[in-house]
């Protein structure tokens, strides 16, 4: 379809000033470039340019899904509670799930994800192994009432996701489709111009076993990653860790109580005792769902990984500030010796190598040096508890020091196994005649988050520097005046480009040249053709490549064909064939 736009008509409300609520580049630039507007916290309207870019991402995702044999469909955004009761998630999903009632008082939720609906759909329709494997996807609005919606489209409450679900008769078939989805996800990232890294992840709320996240690398990304040159990479939350330890004390010694007035933090303690933070032990207090007190011990210089804590002690939650008062616990001086009755002591495995520990005395203003496990206290559970960090040894090649990076999770693939098919009774007749639960996989791409991630990686001080695959409009034709000399030339180039199949906007607004240039760079049209009186007199126009900043004069004759050719080459770089 011919895509020719007059910017005088197009609804692109650009802003000159940075909006104060925007903390990150993508949020700021999408507001300023007139692509989105906020309706409520974490809920946005897509204006015409935002919607065009979003649809381009959808289409790339669609092409890649179709190419691996997944079939497009559409499920409802409003889902009945009964299905969530069947899967068991109605009770565990928590306040992120937006629940509502209809006029008859029946309970529903706004879908944060669609495992329940798809499983219920398939169980009534697919009966035989002969119909498997089956893979289905949709591109649809999701709702999650996030605790902290922020960064515009990066963490919204209402957002657009592509979610695919697959059904298999055996593990081999599931693995095959999982690999195909992961391959498609890599190609999607490449076609969006994203610098990315697939990482091992934790399966969290959705459940299941094998899972990989695709991280768009960004300094302000919410996720921390560790990776090794051997190819191993993981989200720090999911990374098993080999914490290097160099025990300072290697021999038995007597336990000594040290007066440590006003010392509440590990940093203060290590300074007062003149030992490294690494040689102290940090104790955090939590409780089990049944209310049992839990002490979690990690090396003083490390952070507790809450997911690992939850694996070691299912359901454990760290105490809130108020709990310390009501339980009469000295927050800054906790330790494993003389713990309150029935306390569960859990320690990071790396501390096993430590002969004598420096710990809190469970008494304000006192610490214990030389406390020894078995002699002075008992550890009930040894477990990997710490967040991995750069410098740790790689758990795969077991030597090299890990490097760190930050990323935005743009997509994730999961092997669910039989979690949903078993709880919801979705079975098929296998080749041997037996009834078996489907093996399932699920695969999500954050479509609106990907749009923001693209901008995070492609911007400069003047605005957005799109990869052409996601740019809302490919070329801007910018006449510097509206008169008989410039206008006809500009209109002709615009129209020729559109005829050549290029998405082209002409800036025919009654604005100064400076405003037009600033807006063109802000919106980030990848190629710009500037037409002025003097140039026309000499038979030339100025061409500008937004991303590289390259400018050159081009003859008016043939400029449309030349630019159309450049657009075609640029599109090719991001096409399925170029990256598959
Ligand atoms: P996160 O850890 O960032 O909260 P998630 O792991 O809970 O995300 P998934 O359930 O894996 O998210 O959903 C698939 C994809 O949907 C994510 O990879 C992400 O790109 C996108 N997504 C999830 N939550 C949001 C959100 N609040 N706003 C925008 N996109 C989101
Ligand atoms: Mg995820």
Image: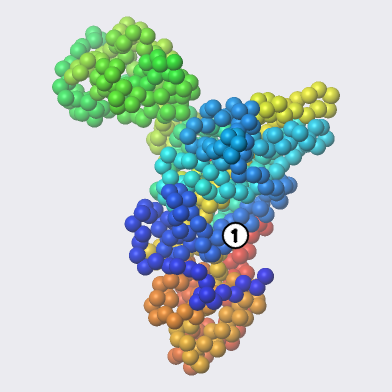
Judge whether residue 347 can be spotted in this image.
no
- Give residue 489's quadrant in the image: bottom right
Most foreground residue, 380 or 24? 24
* Residue found 35% across the figure and 24% down from its top: 319
Instruction: Bin the neighbour count of mark 1 within 10 Å (Cα to Cα): few under 14, some 14-19, many 20 and up.
Output: some
- Give residue 277's quadrant in the image: top left
Residue designated by label 1: 56
Most foreground residue, 225 or 152? 152
* Residue found 20% across the figure and 28% down from its top: 268
Judge whether residue 60 can be spotted in this image.
yes
Quadrant where the N terminus is found in the figure: bottom right
- Give residue 87's quadrant in the image: top right
SS for callout 1: helix
Q: Position of residue 420 (x, y in %)?
A: 65, 29
Mark 1 CB in 8 Å range of ligand 1?
no
Q: Position of residue 471 (x, y in %)?
A: 54, 64
Q: Position of residue 349 (x, y in %)?
A: 42, 20
**Left-right relation of 168 to 561:** right
> Hey, which residue is sitting farthest top in the picture?
375
* Residue found 64% across the figure and 44% down from its top: 76
| Depicted 453 relative to depicted 239: above or below | below
Most foreground residue, 508 or 285? 508
| Depicted 480 relative to depicted 180: above or below | below
Most foreground residue, 525 or 3? 3
Coloring applied to the structure: rainbow
| Depicted 355 relative to depicted 235: above or below | above
* Residue found 44% across the figure and 55% down from its top: 38
């Amino acid at each position: 379809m011919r895509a020719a736009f007059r910017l005088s008509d197009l609804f692109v409300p650009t802003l000159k000033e940075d909006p104060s609520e925007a903390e990150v580049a993508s949020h700021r630039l999408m507001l300023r470039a007139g692509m989105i507007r906020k309706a409520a916290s974490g809920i946005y309207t897509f204006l015409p340019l935002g919607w065009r870019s979003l649809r381009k991402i959808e289409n790339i995702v669609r092409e890649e899904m179709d190419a691996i044999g997944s079939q497009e469909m559409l499920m409802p955004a409003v889902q009945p509670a009964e299905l969530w009761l069947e899967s068991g998630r109605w009770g565990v999903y928590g306040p992120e799930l937006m629940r509502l009632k209809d006029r008859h008082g029946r309970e529903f939720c706004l879908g944060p994800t669609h495992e329940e609906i798809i499983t219920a759909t398939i169980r009534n329709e697919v009966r035989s192994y002969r119909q498997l494997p089956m893979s289905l996807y949709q591109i649809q609005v999701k709702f999650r009432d996030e605790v902290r919606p922020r960064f515009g489209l990066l963490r919204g409450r209402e957002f657009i996701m592509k979610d695919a679900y697959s059904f298999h008769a055996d593990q081999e078939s599931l693995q095959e489709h999982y690999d195909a989805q992961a391959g498609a996800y890599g190609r999607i990232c490449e076609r969006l111009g994203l610098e990315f890294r697939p990482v091992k992840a934790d399966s969290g709320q959705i459940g299941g076993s094998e899972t990989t996240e695709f991280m768009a690398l960004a300094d302000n990304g919410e996720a921390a990653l560790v990776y090794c040159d051997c190819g191993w990479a993981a989200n720090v939350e999911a990374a098993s860790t080999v914490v290097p330890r160099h025990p300072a004390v290697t021999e038995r010694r007597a336990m000594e109580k040290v007066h440590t007035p006003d010392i509440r933090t590990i940093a203060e303690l290590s300074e007062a005792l003149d030992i490294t933070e690494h040689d102290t032990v940090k104790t955090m207090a939590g409780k089990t769902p049944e209310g049992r007190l839990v002490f979690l011990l990690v090396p003083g210089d490390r952070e507790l990984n809450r997911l690992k804590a939850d694996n070691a002690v299912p359901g454990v939650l760290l105490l809130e500030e108020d709990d310390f008062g009501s339980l009469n616990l000295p927050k800054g001086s906790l330790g494993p010796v003389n713990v309150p009755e029935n306390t569960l002591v859990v320690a990071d495995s790396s501390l096993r190598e430590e002969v004598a520990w420096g710990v809190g005395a469970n008494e304000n203003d006192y610490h214990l040096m030389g406390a020894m496990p078995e002699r002075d206290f008992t550890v009930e559970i040894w477990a990997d508890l710490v967040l991995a960090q750069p410098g740790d040894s790689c758990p795969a090649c077991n030597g090299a020091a890990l490097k760190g990076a930050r990323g935005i999770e743009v997509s994730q693939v999961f092997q669910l196994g039989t979690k949903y098919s078993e709880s919801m009774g979705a079975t098929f007749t296998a080749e041997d005649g037996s009834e078996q639960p489907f093996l399932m996989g699920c695969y999500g791409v954050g479509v609106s988050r990907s749009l923001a991630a693209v901008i995070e990686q492609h911007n400069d001080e003047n605005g957005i520097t799109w990869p052409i695959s996601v740019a809302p409009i490919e070329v801007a034709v910018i006449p510097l005046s509206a008169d008989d000399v410039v206008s006809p030339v500009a209109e002709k180039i615009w129209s020729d480009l559109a005829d050549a199949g290029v998405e082209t906007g002409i800036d025919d607004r009654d604005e100064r040249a400076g405003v037009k240039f600033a807006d063109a760079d802000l919106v980030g049209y990848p190629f710009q053709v500037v037409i002025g009186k003097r140039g026309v007199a000499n038979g030339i126009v100025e061409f500008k490549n937004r991303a590289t900043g390259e400018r050159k004069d081009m003859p008016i004759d043939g400029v449309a064909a030349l630019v159309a050719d450049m657009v075609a080459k640029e599109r090719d770089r991001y096409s399925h064939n170029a990256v598959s």
